[in-house]
Image: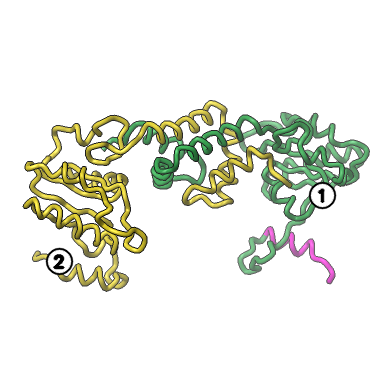
Chain colours: A green, B yellow
Amino acid sequence: MRLPRPLENLIDQLSKLPTIGPKTAQRLALYILKMPGGEVKELAQSILDARFMVYPCPICGNLTDKSPCIICQDEERDRSLLCVVEEASDILAIERTGYNGRYYVLNRTFRLMEDGDLTDIDTENFQQMLQPIVQEVILAMNPTIDGEVISRYLHTIVEEKGIKVTRLAHGLPVGGDIEYADEITLRQALEGRKEI
Amino acid sequence: MRLPRPLENLIDQLSKLPTIGPKTAQRLALYILKMPGGEVKELAQSILDARFMVYPCPICGNLTDKSPCIICQDEERDRSLLCVVEEASDILAIERTGYNGRYYVLNRTFRLMEDGDLTDIDTENFQQMLQPIVQEVILAMNPTIDGEVISRYLHTIVEEKGIKVTRLAHGLPVGGDIEYADEITLRQALEGRKEI
């Protein structure tokens, strides 16, 4: 049986989203058909609002609906600390640790195998952030080869300005299991061992 | 950190959908922010179209965007067979078996513990379907207590008209394991055993 066209179309659209397979898409679509009309309008509007009202902060690249973003506006933030991340969603994770410095979001995942040249990356905004008040730049790239490559590139830029550069520690994840740790992580955990 | 309000709102809206927890909602929302604007508009529109253009067929209760639905319009269907299901989504499953009769969708899940009286169920449309051409009504309710209750109720209505009533066989699911079958299913499988 062919489904009604608008229903089939919705299932197709939902299947395109990450984590949603065809079965889940069908279940969600049938659920949406039974939702009150008002709630469905709100859902559709919230999708449009998020897409068209939220944009990267022109200063730091964080997601915002006003310019500059609340972190750039916040006078209480420690302006001597600058944490560089790949995606705005990484900020959410770092904020939960209690970090209170500023951020710079690359908003661009560098892929060594696909992207040509590191110098393609526009670092003008980043250089703008490296004001004299900044005393330390924390490179918080993902612990992958690509993250490592871009870290090293940014490292050279920051070092030229004579600012201290650090990166997140590698080691065993808390709650993890030594037996199942990969050898690179374990080697880094050994190298980074601390006196207790 | 507070998220931009439109983004927070979208995450809230998505979390209300089944199978989508707060982490998935955040992931989907951030994905939507990066989708091309045109695709986001299509997604929002497809949600509205499905909700407001699809409705239950006034004859059989199947989901449709035209009246009557394609199954009721289809002259090739075997009109002597009528299969009664709880939800329109059950039709999708039964169609895949190659069944070629008509359907009646209750569009209502009866819950013995919550709903008061079976006689609250509007059976007028159902009785309309029981034309003299119908020779067999297949009750395809979910194999639950509630499904059983409503099956028996519909049974009495169909029997009064002198039409043959059948229900789906209970037994071992194909690919299942006798060791893990519950005792009720296994007892039904024994009772329904067939000569080979």
Residue A129 in magenta stretch = no
Q: Residue at x 29, y 67 (%)?
A: B177
What amino acid is labelled 1 in the image? Asn
Q: Is residue B76 left or right of residue B39?
A: left
Tag 2: Cα neighbours inside 10 Å, few (<14), some, or many (≥20)? few
Q: Nearer the viewer, residue B112 or B44?
A: B112
Q: Nearer the viewer, residue A80 or A148?
A: A80
Q: Residue at x 87, y 37 (%)?
A: A130
Magenta stretch?
A184-196
Quadrant for the C terminus of chain A, please: bottom right
Vertical placement of residue A114 versus B174, above or below: above
Q: Residue at x 67, y 44 (%)?
A: A89
Q: Is residue A156 visible?
A: yes
Residue beneath disc 2: B192
Vertical placement of residue A163 versus B171, above or below: above
Q: Position of residue A120 (x, y in %)?
A: 72, 29
Q: Evaluate if marks 2 and 1 touch, with contact meaning CB atoms under 8 Å apart.
A: no
Q: Residue at x 24, y 55 (%)?
A: B119
Hey, which quadrant is residue A67 in on the image? top right
Q: Is residue B174 visible?
A: no
Disc assigned to residue A189: none
Tag 1: Cα neighbours inside 10 Å, few (<14), some, or many (≥20)? some
Is label 2 in a helix, a strand or a loop? loop
Calculate the distance from the C-alpha at mark 2 to the C-alpha at mark 1.
Answer: 69 Å
Residue beneath disc 1: A100
Q: Position of residue A100 (x, y in %)?
A: 82, 49
Residue under mark 2: which chain is it in? B
Q: Position of residue A54 (x, y in %)?
A: 66, 33
